[in-house]
Image (spheres, rainbow, N blue to C red):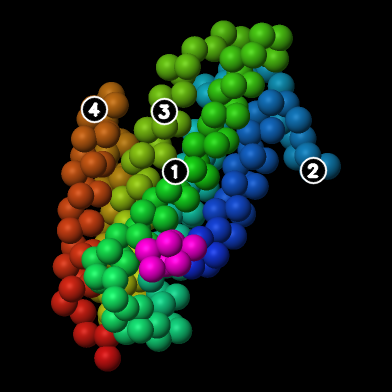
């Protein structure tokens, strides 16, 4: 049963991750000095992960991916009216929700990590560019990917909750976005960003399971 649920989640959300991956790879190729579209303009003399605004582009796509994944996994079930059916399978409800969250989290990190690794491997290959490269230069990209994880969890929670879309239902997502902004603005090193991110993610996870347990699905 668990395998079927995981495959169901992959079938319903893989296209979102694939679209985000294509956009990410487009930016990566651009950082390598290759313009795939006639109206694109990229420089081939940028310092990898430092110039060209790659981390900012990564963050924008990651935020869009996180929001799309979270809502697709929860509001989609509400629209189709399948929550009641899904949560009354022989598998415990917390296992079903946990599988959904695990699949979404893995898709999110895999989609974000693959372009970073491709770009870093290219930058680490001799003769590809004239500037120095150290793997520590990728730290900001990895931290951005981690810091946006609560946005995915908050989107999952917002899609799970009932209420007005332009009211209280979107409060978790708005709160996660505000906390992400504060963490990025105030953090000056990876512990100051990673530790609050993990704490916020753990709190949102607790609320997700509490809402699933107490919500009326009738």
Q: Residue 199: image x %, image y %?
A: 19, 44
Q: Which mark is residue 140?
A: 3
Q: How far apart, in angstroms, are the residues tagged by discs 4 and 3? A: 12 Å
Relative to 101, does residue 149 appear above or below in the rendering?
above
Q: How far apart, in angstroms, are the residues tagged by discs 2 and 3? A: 28 Å
**Mark 2 or 3 closer to N-term?**
2
Tell me the residue that label 4 is attached to.
191
Who's the residue at 60% across and 29% down the image? 118
Dot 4, crowdedness within 10 Å: few (<14), some or many (≥20)? few
Q: Residue 186: image x %, image y %?
A: 25, 33
Q: Mostly what secondary structure, the magenta segment?
A: helix
**Mark 4 or 1 closer to N-term?**
1
Tell me the residue that label 2 is attached to.
37
Q: How far apart, in angstroms, are the residues tagged by discs 3 and 1? A: 15 Å
Q: Quadrant of the N terminus?
A: bottom left
The secondary structure type at the circle numbered 1 is helix
């Amino acid at each position: 049963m668990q395998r079927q649920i995981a495959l169901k989640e992959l079938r319903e959300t893989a296209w979102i991750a694939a679209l985000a991956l294509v956009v990410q790879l487009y930016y990566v190729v651009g950082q390598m000095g290759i313009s795939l579209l006639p109206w694109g303009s990229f420089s081939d003399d940028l310092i990898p992960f430092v110039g060209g605004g790659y981390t900012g582009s990564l963050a924008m796509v990651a935020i869009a991916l996180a929001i799309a994944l979270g809502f697709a996994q929860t509001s989609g079930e509400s629209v189709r009216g399948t929550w009641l059916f899904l949560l009354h399978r022989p598998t415990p409800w917390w296992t079903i929700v946990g599988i959904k969250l695990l699949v979404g989290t893995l898709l999110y990190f895999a989609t974000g990590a693959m372009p970073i690794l491709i770009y870093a491997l290219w930058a680490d290959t001799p003769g590809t560019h004239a500037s120095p490269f150290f793997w520590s230069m990728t730290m900001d990209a990895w931290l951005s990917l981690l810091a946006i994880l609560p946005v995915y969890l908050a989107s999952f929670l917002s899609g799970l909750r009932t209420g007005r879309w332009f009211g209280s239902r979107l409060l978790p997502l708005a709160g996660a976005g505000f906390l992400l902004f504060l963490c990025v603005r105030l953090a000056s090193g990876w512990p100051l960003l990673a530790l609050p991110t993990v704490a916020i993610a753990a709190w949102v996870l607790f609320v997700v399971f509490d809402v699933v347990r107490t919500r009326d699905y009738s």
